[in-house]
C-alpha cells in the first residue's frame, strides 16, 4: 500500500499530478475551469482550489469547483469539467487517514478535459438510492466508519454502480472497466450483473498496488485502463459514493498515461509498519507551539509566488537575479522594482546540512518526530547567481552531495492556527 510522506497531503499530491500533466501535454494558460475532488480536503470549511490555482500558476479568472463528501467526488468533478466551457483541469487527490494495515492508500490523478481531446466521453449515467451507514465520517472526525454489514454494503455498491452502468448503451462493447475498488474483489462483484469479463476489470484495477485512495482509486484505475486502450476501445468507469449513488461514464479511445501499466507503478521505498503509522501522524498528533520561522498569514500570503513557484526578481538595470525579490539589487544596488523572474525547477546543491533529532526549530519538530532527521540545502542554479535555502525531502539527506541536481516540489512546511503552510522543498533528480 502507498503511504504519503509526512509532508504530503491531498494538496501536495494534487500539485504533483497536475505538474506531471503540464510537463507532457496541457497548457496551463488555456485552463478555464478547475474541478478538484477529494474526500480528504485540507479543511472542513475553506476552499482548496484557490491554493491549487496559485501553486500551479493558473490564471486568476479560472472558475473552480470542489467536490468532496464521498468517493463519488471524482465522478462529480469529471462530470462538471465535461460540462464546463473551455479547457478544464480535473484533479482527484486523496489520502484517507487510517491504519495502512486496513488497506488505506493514497494517490492523485490529473486529467485535462478539452474539446479536441484524444478520448471522448459519449455517455454518462447515474443511479441514486438511499443507503445510509456505509463509509461515513462524522463531523470533525478523521475516522472513516461503516456499520459493517457486508452483504448490505455489497448490495448497495452493486445496485448503484451496476444501476448506473445499465444506463449506458452497448455496454457489451466495453473492453476495459475501472470500477469502484475499495478492495480488489469489489470490481468483479459489481460486474456480476454486467457483460464485462475479468480481463477488462483487471486492466482498470490498481487498488491491489496503491491501496484504497478514496475518490482517486477508480480514476487511477481509469488512467491505467486508458494507457492500455487503443483508438477504437471503449472504457467504462463505475464510481460509487456512500450514502447511495453510482456514476458511469464511457470513454472512447486511449491515452499515453505514464506510470500505471503493469510493472510501471513505482515500487518506491519499503518502510516498516511503525514508520508508516508515524508518517501518517497516527502515532503523533501533538500540537506545536510557536517557532522561530513564524510568519503572520498576511505576510506569508505576500510571498506565495516565491514559496510555490520560486518567483525571483531580475534587476532592470543589470539583469542580476535576486531571491527573494526584496530590497536593493545585490549586484548594483539599484532600487528600481525587480521584474518577475521564475527560477528553474531544477537546481544544484551548493551546501548541505542534516538537522538531527532535537535540533529542529519548534515549527519543524512534529515533522521530525514523524520523519526523522531532515536535510537543509542551499540551492543554486546554472548561469544564475541567486541561491536559496530549502529542506530536502523524499531522500536520505546523507546521500545528497554538493553538485547534485535537485528538483523543486511543493510540500507541507508546517501548520499554524490550524492552517497548513506549503512551500518548495527539493528532491534528488537521480
Ligand atoms: Zn542590478
Image: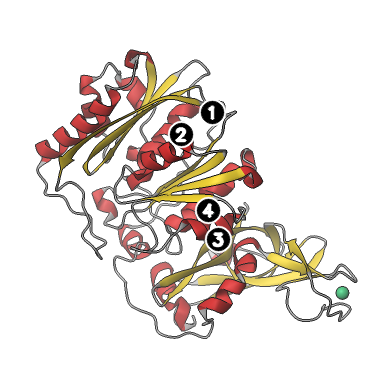
Residue identified by numbered label 3: 410
Indicate the position of residue 331 as horizontal and vertical percent values: 86, 77
Marks 2 and 1: CB-CB under 8 Å?
yes
**Sequence-first disc among 4 and 3:** 4
Residue identified by numbered label 2: 223
Residue identified by numbered label 4: 15
Indicate the position of residue 233 as horizontal and vertical percent values: 46, 17
Marks 4 and 3: CB-CB under 8 Å?
yes
**Sequence-first disc among 2 and 1:** 2
Q: Identify which residue is drawn at 43% across, 67% down.
A: 371
**Sequence-first disc among 1 and 3:** 1
**Residue 336 shows in this picture:** yes
Q: Is residue 25 above or below residue 202?
A: below
Q: Is residue 26 above or below residue 228?
A: below
Indicate the position of residue 279 as horizontal and vertical percent values: 38, 63
Front residue of this view, candidates 309 and 5: 309
Find the distance from the CA under tag 4 to the CA under tag 2. Answer: 17 Å
Give the colouring mode of the picture.
Answer: secondary structure
Find the distance from the CA under tag 4 to the CA under tag 3. Answer: 7 Å
Quick one: label 1, few (<14), some, or many (20+) residues within 10 Å?
A: some
Quadrant field for ligand 1: bottom right
Q: Is residue 142 above or below residue 127?
A: below
Q: Identify which residue is drawn at 62% across, 55% down.
A: 57
**Sequence-first disc among 4 and 2:** 4
User: Helix or strand or loop: what does disc 3 sit on?
Assistant: strand
Which disc number belongs to residue 137?
Answer: none
Find the distance from the CA under tag 1 to the CA under tag 3. Answer: 27 Å
Q: Identify which residue is drawn at 51% across, 60% down.
A: 51
Find the distance from the CA under tag 1 to the CA under tag 4. Answer: 21 Å
User: Helix or strand or loop: what does disc 1 sit on?
Assistant: loop
Residue identified by numbered label 1: 255
Amino acid at each position: 500500500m502507498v503511504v504519503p510522506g509526512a509532508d504530503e497531503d491531498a494538496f501536495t499530491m494534487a500539485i504533483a499530478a497536475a505538474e506531471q500533466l503540464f510537463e507532457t501535454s496541457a497548457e496551463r494558460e488555456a485552463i478555464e475551469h478547475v474541478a478538484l475532488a477529494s474526500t480528504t480536503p485540507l479543511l472542513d470549511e475553506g476552499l482548496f482550489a484557490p491554493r491549487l490555482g496559485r501553486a500551479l500558476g493558473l490564471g486568476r479568472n479560472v472558475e473552480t469547483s470542489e467536490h468532496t463528501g464521498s468517493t463519488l467526488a471524482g465522478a462529480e468533478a469529471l462530470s462538471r469539467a465535461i460540462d464546463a466551457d473551455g479547457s478544464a483541469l480535473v484533479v482527484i487527490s486523496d489520502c484517507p487517514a487510517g491504519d495502512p494495515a486496513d488497506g488505506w492508500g493514497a494517490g492523485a490523478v490529473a486529467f485535462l478535459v478539452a474539446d479536441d481531446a484524444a478520448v471522448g466521453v459519449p455517455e454518462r449515467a447515474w443511479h441514486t438510492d438511499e443507503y445510509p451507514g456505509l463509509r461515513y465520517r462524522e463531523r470533525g472526525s478523521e475516522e472513516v466508519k461503516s456499520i459493517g454489514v457486508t452483504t448490505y454494503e455489497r448490495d448497495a455498491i452493486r445496485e448503484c454502480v451496476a444501476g448506473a452502468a445499465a444506463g449506458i448503451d452497448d455496454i457489451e462493447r466495453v473492453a476495459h472497466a475501472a470500477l469502484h475498488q475499495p478492495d480488489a474483489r469489489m470490481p468483479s462483484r459489481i460486474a456480476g450483473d454486467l457483460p464485462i469479463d475479468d480481463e477488462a476489470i483487471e486492466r482498470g484495477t490498481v487498488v491491489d498496488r496503491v491501496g484504497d485512495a478514496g475518490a482517486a482509486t477508480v480514476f487511477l484505475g481509469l488512467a491505467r485502463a486508458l494507457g492500455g486502450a487503443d483508438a477504437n476501445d471503449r472504457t467504462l468507469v463505475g464510481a460509487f459514493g456512500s450514502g447511495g449513488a453510482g456514476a458511469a461514464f464511457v470513454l472512447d479511445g486511449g491515452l499515453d498515461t505514464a506510470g500505471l501499466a503493469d510493472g510501471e507503478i513505482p515500487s518506491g521505498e519499503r518502510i516498516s509498519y511503525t514508520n508508516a503509522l508515524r508518517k501518517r501522524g497516527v502515532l503523533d498528533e501533538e500540537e506545536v507551539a510557536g517557532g522561530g520561522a513564524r510568519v503572520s498569514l498576511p505576510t506569508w500570503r505576500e510571498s506565495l509566488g516565491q514559496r510555490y513557484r520560486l518567483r525571483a526578481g531580475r534587476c532592470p538595470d543589470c539583469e542580476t537575479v535576486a531571491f527573494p525579490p526584496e530590497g536593493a539589487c545585490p549586484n548594483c544596488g539599484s532600487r528600481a522594482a525587480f521584474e518577475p523572474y521564475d527560477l528553474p525547477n531544477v537546481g544544484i546543491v551548493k551546501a548541505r546540512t542534516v538537522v538531527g533529532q532535537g535540533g529542529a526549530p519548534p515549527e519543524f519538530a512534529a515533522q521530525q518526530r514523524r520523519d526523522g532527521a531532515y536535510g537543509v540545502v542551499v540551492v543554486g542554479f546554472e548561469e544564475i547567481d541567486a541561491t536559496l535555502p530549502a529542506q530536502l525531502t523524499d531522500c536520505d539527506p546523507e546521500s545528497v552531495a554538493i553538485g547534485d541536481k535537485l528538483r523543486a516540489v511543493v510540500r507541507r512546511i508546517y501548520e499554524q492556527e490550524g492552517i497548513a503552510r506549503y512551500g518548495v522543498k527539493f528532491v534528488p533528480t537521480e
